[in-house]
Image (cartoon, helix red, strand yellow):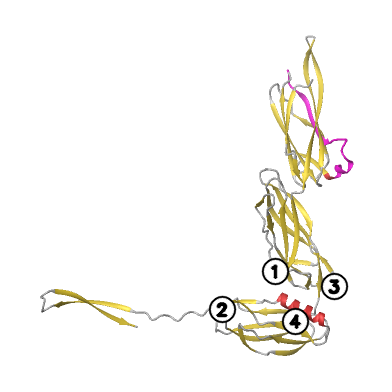
Amino acid sequence: MPKIEFEIMYDENGLVWEWLPVTVEFCNKEMSTISDLSISLNLDPKSDASLERTTQIKTASNFESKLVSSSVLNHPLPNIAQGEKQSFKFFIKTLTAATRKFLLKISYKCEIDIMYKNAVCPTEFSKVFSVTSKIPFQVTHELLSMQFSPLATVAKKEKFLVVPKIKCTSHVPIKFTNSSISLGSHVISDGENLSQVSDVELSEGECATDCFCVSTGKDASNGSSVSLGHYLLFWKRAEEDAPAVSVSIALPSITVEDWGIWVDVDLPPQGVVRTPLTIAYEIKNTSIHVQELSVSMHVSDAFMFSGHKEVRLRILPGWHECVTYTLYPLLAGYVQLPRLTISMETNTNTSASESLDNFILRILPSHLFIMPQEKASKCRSRYLFKSCCLCNLILGIETEVPFIIIEE
């Protein structure tokens, strides 16, 4: 009968994708030193064969190895003297949500006294334990314009936001160490996209939101569906020293549209009431055809403006035209700008015109912050106090009477 005591310490409720630590502690209760000690961990042979492909087991010593396996067999351990204790750690990773049974097997040799003679006795025993894995979080995605409105289509080179939303479903707090985005071949990053969830801890039911600014490349064809790539999330249990793991989540696709024009705007960051400001629209022809356009500036209650209320342009391929307006703000606050509309003279399709209007509204700023005028400086008063001694001839008493001189 084996006289070695051992205890398996682990969380019965594991999380999918994590490296769950399983610690085995030994205590030698035999009458002699234990030798040829080895330990094995694998799925219970009675388990479903499909679980073997979604289960990985490593030891602490070979954790950095790229080789993965669903079992660790006959791993050697040092000898344990009588009464001594020793511990060994496994790491289990599950790729699907399910309940798995694992078989832990320990074998060793020890000397026993039989009829006043020492004999080497090989000993082996095993124990079955189970781990139930659950999905730790759910990730959904939103595609938003730069004005934070939902997007169904984007134009070539148009900037837009990829917004992953994370909801924690784990029974224990989890910590996100980093996140990034791996973009598709027709998508480029706009500037340095830093993680918004780095070092964020979530408990069950809590949510976090990430955000990345991207744009489609010039080589994306009109009407094509472009794959945005993958969202990479690095996380671990908040209370464990286990290493962080990465999860790759596919991003949605988006349809690319090409209207053959692009509009850039040169606008100051803010304005002042009753102080003129200049706004310039640079309209580019990105197609291979001559574009005949009608540009209109709509009347606004918040601004007066000077410039062409309606102008017709003929732009050659690869060229651009600039339309400039002088705005005169009438109201203070976050004020809506006068609306600029562009229509193609060669296109009489109403639905296409509406789509072009939506495209123009999406890529142009809609509001500008207008500050109130500085109040007129108040007249400053300077008070000069001068004392003089007056003699009250009637009472015969000296008094000090202040004189006040006011200068404006």
Return the residue at label 4. Answer: 284
Mark seen at residue 223:
3
Image spot of residue 327 (x, y percent):
61, 85
- The residue depicted at 69 percent of the width and 71 percent of the height is 147
Q: Contact, CB < 8 Å: mark 2 with mark 3?
A: no
Q: Contact, CB < 8 Å: mark 2 with mark 4?
A: no
Return the residue at label 1. Answer: 148
Asked whether 96 or 106 is in front, the reply is 96
The answer to which of marks 3 and 4 sits earlier in the sequence is 3
Q: CA distance from mark 3 to mark 1?
A: 23 Å
Membership of 42 in magenta stretch: yes
Q: Which residues are magenta?
A: 31-53
Q: Secondary structure at mark 1?
A: loop
Could you tell me the amino acid type at mark 3? Gly
Return the residue at label 2. Answer: 332
Mark 2 or 3: the one toward you: 2
The image quadrant of residue 282 is: bottom right
Membership of 335 in magenta stretch: no
Image spot of residue 338 (x, y percent):
66, 82
The answer to which of marks 4 and 1 sits earlier in the sequence is 1
The answer to which of marks 2 and 4 sits earlier in the sequence is 4
Above or below: residue 93 compared with residue 84: below
Could you tell me the amino acid type at mark 1? Phe
